[in-house]
Amino acid sequence: MSKLLVENLTKTYAGTKAVCDVSISIGDGELLCLLGPSGCGKSTVLRMIAGFETPSSGRIVIDGEDVAHLPPDKRPTGMVFQSHALWSHMTVAQNIAFGLKLRGLTREAVRAKVAQVLELVGLAGFDKRYPGQLSGGQQQRVAIARCVVLAPKILLMDEPFSALDAHLRVRLREEVRGIQQRLGLTTIFVTHDQEEALTLADRIVVMNSGRVEQIGSPSAVYAGPATRFVAEFIGTMNMIETMVAAEVASIAGMPFSVESSDGPHRIAMRPEDIALSHLPGPGLPATVERILDLGAIRMVDARLGSGEIVKVQTGKTEACRPGERVWLTAGAMVAFDADGTVRRARPLRPEARLHG
Ligand code: ADP
């Protein structure tokens, strides 16, 4: 059983808060992704858990033990970095065996564990090669093997694949997920790539400016962003500016109910939640401006009478022409107030026929 509790973690550098009051709890065998733009504090959180940075305040508890006073090598954590940092003068087997030898294992035990872990990362037979004789992806597999062979309670991965090309990145993250699940390793994975987080994580922690914006499963964070930042950072989201008065807002003449106080708001709708009709009917009238063929789907840019562009996802077979008049209806939407806090929203009089 390996559980990690991070409580009110804060890190200040020369008066600037890099991490501010972050609290996260990670269950046994869970893979948690820290997701956010560059500079939002993800690596600093990870480095504090590993012991490479000292928190300004807060607690880090692993399986009930506060590890704050322990140096990195005494913590039950293992870290894989973006650059694999293998020892170039050592063979693959020697790189992996190094930590095991420090622990005083017998030669036979070391040999058996190295063979086992090389099999696990798909590098059986590569033991006598030097890092310079391996591809970038293979080197990163060795770095993972070197880490997991020491059976850490918590595996920490800091953008481990961001230096690799897109195809390899996808393959390696699937492999890492497989290894993590097979070993039941409690893991924190740092990435700025939302697709990586959405496909890998049991839960995602979305960070912005040193703070946690939202914690939830990939589907919960995607479908129910808690803040405007999350809505705009994850996936594609249409954000249409509007004013709310007496809980009613209007977009291109179409009224919406918004459960919020008076003032400027944004109504948020995902492209795949909007239906496009070629016949006049309920919904927002718009003009097709551009059609982007994305292979499996199409993305249609439709301009509202108010001048704003709404992105609508359609199927491959959708017959649409630039300049065509269409009517848009949203199946799901939310609103965000001026502070970026989420509010409930829905169209009023969906049966209304508007010809803006
Ligand atoms: P991320 O991993 O999300 O890209 P980091 O955790 O690396 O972000 O950095 C968070 C913030 O802390 C950034 O503004 C960065 O410039 C700052 N920072 C990180 N390390 C140091 C340091 N050693 N000294 C001063 N500022 C730092």
Image (cartoon, helix red, strand yellow):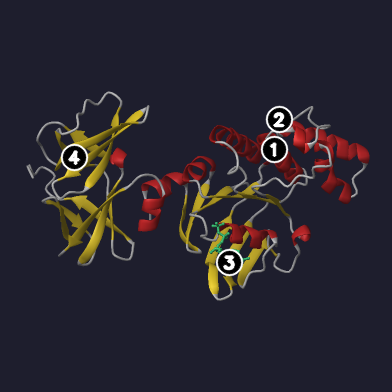
Instruction: Return the residue at label 2.
Output: 122
Structural crowding at the residue carrying mark 4, measured as other residues with C-alpha within 10 Å and reported as few (<14), some (14–19) or many (≥20)? many
Residue farthest top in this picture: 317
* Residue type at the position of mark 2: Gly
Instruction: Return the residue at label 4.
Output: 328
Cα distance between the residues tagged 2 and 4: 49 Å
Cα distance between the residues tagged 4 and 3: 45 Å
Locate residue 174: give its quadrant. Answer: top right
Structural crowding at the residue carrying mark 1, measured as other residues with C-alpha within 10 Å and reported as few (<14), some (14–19) or many (≥20)? many
Residue at point 53% right, 45% down? 202
Instruction: Return the residue at label 1.
Output: 141
Q: Nearer the viewer, residue 203 or 158?
A: 158
Cα distance between the residues tagged 1 and 2: 8 Å
* Residue type at the position of mark 3: Glu
Q: Earlier in the sequence, mark 1 or mark 4?
A: 1
Q: Earlier in the sequence, mark 1 or mark 3?
A: 3
Residue farthest front in this picture: 132
Cα distance between the residues tagged 3 and 2: 37 Å
- Residue 179 appears at what percent x and percent y? 66, 37
